[in-house]
Structures are given as structure tokens and as C-alpha cells.
Image: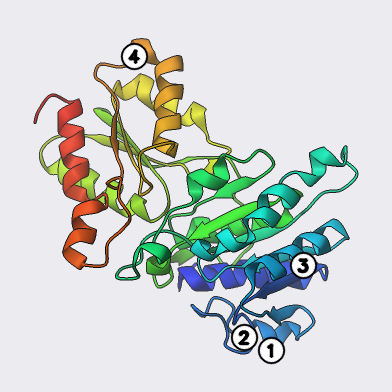
Amino acid sequence: MREIQFREALREAMSEEMRKDPSIVLLGEEVAEYNGAYKVSQGMLAEFGAERVLDTPIAELGFAGIGVGAAMNGLRPIIEFMTFNFSLVAIDQIINSAAKILSMSGGQYSAPIVFRGPTGNAGQLGAQHSQNFENWFANTPGLKVVVPSNPYDAKGLLKASIRDNDPVIFMESEVMYGDKMDVPAEEYIIPIGLADTKRAGTDITIVSFGKIMKVALAAAEELQKEGISAEVIDLRTVRPIDYAAIVTSVKKTNRLVIVEEAWPLSSIATEITYHVQKHAFDYLDAPIQRVNSFDVPLPYAPTLIQAILPNVEKTIKAVKATLYRD
């Protein structure tokens, strides 16, 4: 076991899979000569060469389309978006081509492709570079959507995503790339669609995913000081969602708070709320609470960013409201 950064865990996952399978290629802006905008692909050009690690023009629609076509013809591309905000330029290729080709071709074609890169807020980047798209892509049949929260999960989930025969959206965060954690040197795979209970508890269930897991876990730590035992579940993937893990936890704790960076309308939190009230209504001792970003474009000022995004204080307030202790 050794401690490595989130970016290193991603690099190891890609490199290990590329050493085994010559059909895997990496495409994106600055992934080759510059070693990646966030240095995720550092050293990969030197190891795998320019035929398998390819710098692209600033044209997401173009290189996403090339990737989808390559996937339909026998390759297994990894497409890096410098930010998923830029994936909107390529969304037709992702949704109307990659996600639908298996169904539209009657199973004759598949698109084993991974679209990966950072999503959500990363500081003072302005509204056009700070949006969350997990719930957008999760609304698309044919896609799988993975949102890891730490280096260990990121490596195991990315390897599973690369091996998957369906198109996978793999969402990271700029503010997590430097996070460090113990990650095994030996190979391991984390199945897509399996949530993980990061902290056991008895009084309330907190569900989150991605970098907002830091908020959920920090809130649970503070709540413990007041004698409140929170069980914290990391979804890890939002399509498919591990509903069973959530329902099982709610049947134990009888209360639920969902913490998510995306806006509230049509959020993952909304979907979970519906599912829990349908399958565990009689176990709920209080209404489900959601902690989302305010329903406005993300501003630039740091004080306003802090006011709008989910944080520890808002999560604690939601938990206490659910426990009728506010």
C-alpha cells in the first residue's frame, strides 16, 4: 500500500489497462505533449506513443465524434474533456450516438467509450465553468455515470469503466486531483453501480457522491460531537444508483438527508427522495431533506460561492431539522 494522489490513481488505471489492451486510446486537449491540463496523463505519451495518446484541437464535438466512431469500429477510446462544461459542445455525439447506438442498431454496434474530466465548481471560474452535469447525463438511457469521491475508488471505478462495453461518463473534480490516499499497488476493480457506506451510524442516513462527500463526512464528524450518529453512504455511481443500499440504511435510521452540488430541480436527490418514499415510506420518521446549491448560476465572488454551495453548516442544519432538533 502506498499513498498517491487522485490524478495518479486515474493515470495508473488508464496506463495499466492500456498495457493490457492495445485497442485503448486516449484523446483530448493537451493530454499528450503538455501531459494533461491537470497532469492526469503525465508520462503517458512517452510510454504509449503518439498513436495512442493524441492531442486534439479545441473542438469537443469533433474529437468526441471521432471517439464514438472509433468505439463502434473496435477501439476503446478514453475521451478527456478539460471540463464537462465543454462537453455541451459534444452532447449530440454523447447522447444521440454513443448512448443510443446499441439500441438503434439492434445490438449490432456498441460504443465502449469513457468520457472523463472534471465537473462542478472549482473556485472562481465563473458560471460557464462551474456547472454540474451528473444529473443531465444520468437522465440518458444507454449511459453509465460514475462520480468517485477519493483516489481509491477512482482507480477501481475507472478500470471498470474502461472495461465496460457501454459508454461511461466518468466525472471528477479539479479540487480533488491533489487529494491523497492509500491505494493498493496490486490490481483491483470496483463494480459500477455499487454504493459504499463510508461511515456507519444509527440516527440518520446522509447520502452524497463526488467531492461533496467531503462535506457529508465532515458534517457527520461534527454531529458525532453532539451525540448524533450519522450513517454516510457514497453512491459512487448515479446511473445506475444503488437504491437497495439507501433503502436498507433508511430502514435502520428512519431518516434521510441527501447532499448534492447540483441544482435542486431534477437532481439526483429528487430521484432518491421519490424512490425512498415509494419503497421505505413506513420507515420514515421525518420528511426527507435535500441540501443542494441555490437555484441560480454560480457567481464569481468567493463569498457568494460559499453562500450558494452545499456546506457543512447547511448539512448539519438539515440533519437537525430532520431530527426535530433545530
Quadrant for residue 45, please give it. bottom right
Q: Secondary structure at mark 4?
A: helix
Q: Residue 22: x and y, percent?
A: 82, 71
Q: Which quadrant of the structure image shows residue 89?
A: bottom right
Question: In this figure, which residue is indicated by the disc labeled 4?
Answer: 283
Tag 2 or tag 3, which sits nearer the N-term? Answer: 2
According to the picture, the residue beneath numbered tag 1 turns out to be 46
Residue 236 appears in the figure: no
Is label 3 or label 2 in front?
Answer: 3
Q: Position of residue 87 (x, y in %)?
A: 57, 61
What mark, if any, has residue 194 been given in the picture? none
Dot 1 alpha-carbon crowd within 10 angstroms: few under 14, some 14 to 19, many 20 or more: few
Disc 2 residue type (three-letter): Gly
Determine which residue is flagged by label 3.
66
What's the distance in space between the residues labelled 1 and 4, CA to CA? 56 Å
Quick one: label 3 or label 1, which is nearer the N terminus? 1
